[in-house]
Image: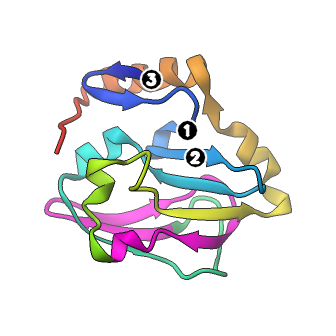
Amino acid sequence: MAIFNKCDIPEDLYYDIENHVWGRKNDDGTVTVGMTDPAQSLAGKIIYAEVKAVGRVIKKGKSAATIESGKYVGPFSVPFTGEIVEVNEELEKDSHIINLDPYGRGWIAKLRPLQESASDINSFITGKEAVSAYTKKLEEEDIICKKR
């Protein structure tokens, strides 16, 4: 895992860097998505996450969840069109797990990409390319992660 400005950037995940979204492609064709370490740090302590219902189709760039913290209320946008097939039910009890473990227990939803989203899925970047692009963004925007 790469670390830059105290922000964790796992090389094995896929990233929509502009929106601070990570994705993990699963063996069943679904993609697990969540907020990156820089995103959770920028948001502050997350007090509430309301994820849309299973079965709901979310269009590229639209919100799959609403995230609320002491200094932020806003959408969690997804970088591809997909159907929500599973939501992280732990978030109902403790949304703060997004801050504590953004790449593990703090995942937000699993989506099944729809046919028309194949090119959007392929625009996710991963590996050294993702780490390089993300560290550049963190440097340009002077983002330093705070651990909670």
Disc 2 residue type? Gly
The extreme right residue here reads 115
- The answer to which image quadrant residue 70 occupies is bottom left
State left or right for residue 37 relative to residue 109: left
Q: Residue at the location (33% across, 55% down)?
A: 98
Q: Compare residues 18 and 22 and report the one nearer the observer.
A: 22
Q: CA distance from mark 2 to mark 3?
A: 15 Å
Please say if 68 is above or below 124. below
Q: Compare residues 97 and 53 and report the one nearer the observer.
A: 97
Disc 3 residue type? Met
Rendered location of residue 72, percent (x, y) = 23, 61
Residue 79 magenta: yes
Q: Which residue is mark 1?
A: 15
Disc 1 residue type? Tyr
Q: Nearer the viewer, mark 1 or mark 3?
A: 3
Rendered location of residue 8, percent (x, y) = 36, 30
Secondary structure under the numbered disc 1 in the rendered image: strand
Residue 125 magenta: no
Q: Compare residues 92 and 78 and report the one nearer the observer.
A: 92
Part of the protein shown in magenta? 64-92
Q: Residues within 10 Å of mark 2 (few under 14, many from 20)?
A: many
Q: Which residue is mark 2?
A: 23
